Image (tube, rainbow, N blue to C red):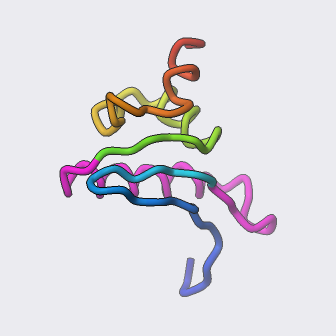
Amino acid sequence: MGGETVAGVIYSKTGNRVTLLATSVFPAFRGKGIPARLLSGILEKLRAQGETATMTCPFAAEFVSAHPEYADVLDSAVPGNSTNAMRRH
């Protein structure tokens, strides 16, 4: 925001699959919807590049569960925690 780093995602990449490991927002910027905007942007970019995602970050898994429009980005062979999150809803 304004040239300042306020949030981040730790990830790893194997081939065309990105594993989202953790999402973090600096305390001063929490409560502003930043993680949702960050994840939306990441998932849109992965979709546009024809890549898939595996969710091991609990927040990312819950985000995809709450936003089924991103279900197509999940790696069907290795979706990660998101399968459990999606079953709860």
Asked if residue 72 lies left or right of residue 25, the reply is: left
Residue 40 versus residue 13 in the image, above or below: above
Asked if residue 46 lies left or right of residue 33, the reply is: left
Query: Residues in magenta?
Result: 23-51
Quadrant where the image shows the C terminus: top right
Residue at x 27% of width, y 53% of height: 16
Residue 47: horizontal and vertical position, in percent?
25, 48
Residue at x 36% of width, y 49% of height: 43
Residue 19 drawn in magenta: no
**Farthest residue, direction bottom:** 3
Residue nearest the viewer, comparing 13 with 3: 13
Overall secondary structure of the magenta section: helix
Residue at x 43% of width, y 32% of height: 79
Asked if residue 16 lies left or right of residue 37, the reply is: left
* Numbered marks: total: 0
**Farthest residue, direction right:** 27
Asked if residue 75 lies left or right of residue 59, the reply is: left
Residue 67: horizontal and vertical position, in percent?
44, 31
Quadrant of the image occupied by residue 5:
bottom right
Residue at x 59% of width, y 54% of height: 35
Residue 28: horizontal and vertical position, in percent?
79, 68
Residue nearest the viewer, comparing 75 with 40: 75
Residue 43 drawn in magenta: yes
Quadrant where the image shows the N terminus: bottom right
